[in-house]
Image (cartoon, rainbow, N blue to C red):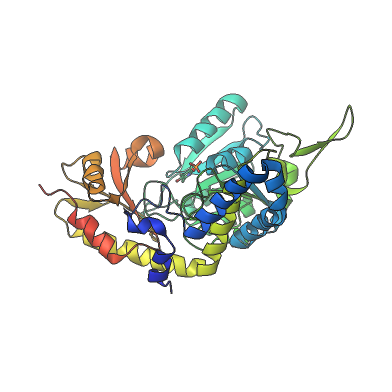
Amino acid sequence: MIDVERARALTPGVRKVAHLNNAGSALPSSAVLETTIDHLRLEAEIGGYEAAADAADRLDAVYTSAARLLNCAPGEIAILDSATRAWDLAFYSIRFEQGDRILTSKAEYASNFIAYLQAAQRFGVHVEVVPNDGLGQISVDALRDLVDERVRLISLTHIPTNGGLVNPAAEVGKVAKEAGALFLLDACQSVGQLPIDVGQLGCDLLSTTGRKYLRAPRGTGLLYVRNGVLDQLEPAFLDLRAARWLSRERYEVQPGARRFESWEYGVAARLGLGAAIDEALGWGLESIRDRVYTLAARLREQLEAVPGCRVRDQGAERCGIVTFTLDGVPADEIKAGLAARSINVSVSRAPSTLLDMTERGLVEVVRASVHYYNTTDELAELCRGLPTR
Ligand SMILES: *Cc1c(COP(=O)(O)O)cnc(C)c1O
């Protein structure tokens, strides 16, 4: 169980706002804040290279923490500056050939789908969208019927940006394994919100961000690359950190996932990411999930009681992202009205998840995403803050 009072005492932002935009960027804890600022200060005092040398052991420990979080080896982790960059580095390293098939889901994030379309233009790959089942999640049966030896990649968004759906990633992982296809999981909204075990999910590649449910500073992200698939990937970029220059003719890429990194990065933010991961592990991902799911279920219940309010979340398992519309009221008006009461929510619009929103006839939804430090009072305040017509 999460000690909510303690969690709030360790989160300075809760004194200013009811933050229900955790799927956008969660409030960092004081430990994350101090770790980050302390390093920036050290850089100013002794020099950036010198400060990094001073922090070498702690920087190394970030890989160990990330590996614990995802249940993999530290060498299978690359630390990057966003989920999108992590995802891109994985996707653009796949050696696609003409006629290869990419199978993906309805809930796909815009950036991912744009990359599939580019691959279709460049390499002549076929992009196919697996239908949903009756619950609005990817149909594993339909996926099983679609796979054949031409499927090079199964690429899935675990939790979409626009709703509470949790796609059955482990089931998809089993199908990918049987089919001998690469499995890339966009876990941007799930890491930090629920337990993630790359072995149990059966994914070869996984990307996530720091600033969302992990509560890390902005400008951080992680990529997991299973050791066994490194041979199938050709990093799109190599620099002097990703590879070593051996002679006039030769270079050698780094062992493991670090071949996807580059030399320069925000050291302070990375240390902050490490502190955020350690904190999440300290609370326990199961406890975090239980608290988040309970709060979200309660919020959905309360919203359903508001006249004209429709909860839009799908799936058998529903997570901390709660989306809704209010008949006749534009989402921006709802967001602005809540902001005036120091309640943060966000608006998710069709272009971010075009296939799903179009299919459901939605142009926008209000997104209230809860974290373990939120309270039931804040949920009630949100409902009270909705405009009435
Ligand atoms: C937010 C989000 C991303 C992008 O993450 P960045 O860190 O902004 O690159 C990717 N996929 C999903 C599902 C997201 O919600």
Q: Residue 383, percent across and down?
A: 21, 57
22 or 115: which is nearer to us? Answer: 22
Q: Residue at x 48, y 49 (%)?
A: 211
Residue at the far front in the pictured view = 45
Specify the quadrant of the image occupied by residue 251: top right
Q: Residue at x 27, y 60 (%)?
A: 379
Q: Residue at x 42, y 68 (%)?
A: 290
Residue at the far top in the pictured view = 121
Q: Is residue 326 left or right of residue 149?
A: left
Specify the quadrant of the image occupied by residue 282: bottom right
Q: How many marks?
A: 0
Q: Is residue 222 visible?
A: no
273 or 316: which is nearer to us? Answer: 273
Q: Is residue 221 above or below residue 173?
A: above
Specify the quadrant of the image occupied by residue 264: top right
Q: Is residue 336 left or right of residue 241?
A: left
In what quadrant of the picture does the N terminus appear? bottom left
Q: Is residue 170 visible?
A: yes
Q: Residue 63, percent across and down?
A: 66, 55
Q: Residue 245, percent across and down?
A: 83, 34
68 or 111: which is nearer to us? Answer: 68
Residue at the far bottom in the pictured view = 1
Q: Residue 193, percent across and down?
A: 46, 59
Q: Is residue 89 above or below residue 138?
A: above
